[in-house]
Image (spheres, grey):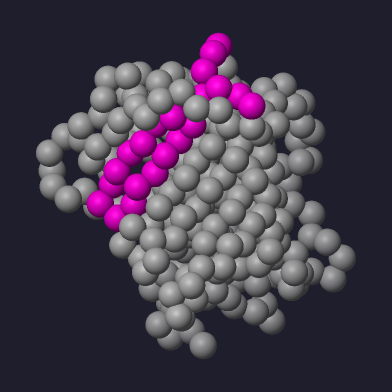
Amino acid sequence: MERQLAPILLSAILMIGCGIPSSSVKADDSAPYIEEHADRILREMSEYLQTAGEFTFRAEVTYDSVTATGGKIQYGGRADVAVRRPDRLHVEYTGDERQNWFVLDGREVTVYDAIVNVYAVTEVPADIDSALDRMVEQYGFSVPIADLVYADPYSTLTGNVVQGSFVGRHAVDGTVCHHLAFSQETIDWQIWIEDGPRPLPRKLVITYKEEVGSPQYTARLSSWDFQPRLADSYFQFHPPAGADEIEFLPIQSTETTR
C-alpha cells in the first residue's frame, strides 16, 4: 500500500521558504508606488527572461532559523534550476536540512526526497505557471526561486508590492548590478540585477518582517546558461533504486492525517 504524506510535512521536506510569497495581501487596494527607474529595470529583467525558451541557473542559498530563545541559526543549500518553456521544469536542491528534486514533465509533477528515498507524483496542468499555481493552491508549497521561472516574472514579483525604489549600483561577486528594494505587507525584498546587455538577477534577499527575529533568506544567482541543450530525459523522473512512492494529500486533508 502506498504511504500518504500530509502536505505540511511534504512542504517541510521540500521547501526552504524561498520565493517571494505571491499570496501576501496588500495593506490596501491602492496602486503600488514604484519609482520609475526601479520599475524599468525590473521590467527589463522580466522581458529578458521571458524571451528565453530554455535556460538553467544556480542559486546559492542561505536562510535564518530563529530558535526558541530568539537566536538565529543560518543554514544553506544550492538549487540547480532548469526551465524549458512552456511545460518543463527540473529543480534539484541540496542543503543542510534537506535534499529534494522537483520535476515537471509536461503532464505530471514529481517531488523526490533523496534523504528518505521517497517520491510523490500528481497530475498538473501542462504549462509551468499553471502547474506551479496548482502545487501552491492544492498542496500548499512552492518551488525554489519560482518567481523567476513564471512566464511573466514582473507581474509575479510585483503583484503584492506596496512600494519599490532604486537603491544604487552595487556589485555582486564582482558584477556591477542595479540594486532595487521593495516592500510588501509582511515582507521586504531586495534584488540585484546585472547592469548591461544581460539584465539577469544576481542576488535576492527577503526579510520576513512580521516573524520573530525578522529572519532573512538570501539567494546568489549564477551560472546562467541560455543554450543548455538538455535532453528530454532530464525532465523525466526515474525513481532511484529502492525508492518508495507516497501519495500527495490536498491541504484540506491535513486535519485528519496523522
Quarter holding the N terminus is bottom right
Q: Where is residue 92 in the image (x, y as percent from the top left)?
A: 69, 50
* Residue depicted at x 55% and y 28%: 171
Q: Position of residue 10 (x, y in %)?
A: 56, 69
Q: How many labels does the image show?
A: 0
Q: Position of residue 119 (x, y in %)?
A: 69, 65
Q: Where is residue 181 in the image (x, y as percent from the top left)?
A: 36, 36
Residue 66 inside the magenta-drawn segment: no
Q: Is the magenta stretch mostly helix, strand or loop?
A: strand
> Observer-nearest residue: 224 or 180?
180
The reply to whether residue 135 is visible in this rendering is no
| Magenta-highlighted residues | 174-197
* Residue depicted at x 42% and y 39%: 190
Check the image and name the residue furthest to the top: 197
The reply to whether residue 48 is visible in this rendering is yes
Q: Is residue 126 left or right of residue 41?
A: right
* Residue depicted at x 51% and y 88%: 258
Q: Image quadrant of residue 110?
A: bottom right
> Observer-nearest residue: 193 or 103?
193
Question: Image height check: is 240 above or below 236?
Answer: below
Residue 194 inside the magenta-drawn segment: yes
* Residue depicted at x 42% and y 70%: 251
Question: Image height check: is 245 above or below 43?
Answer: below
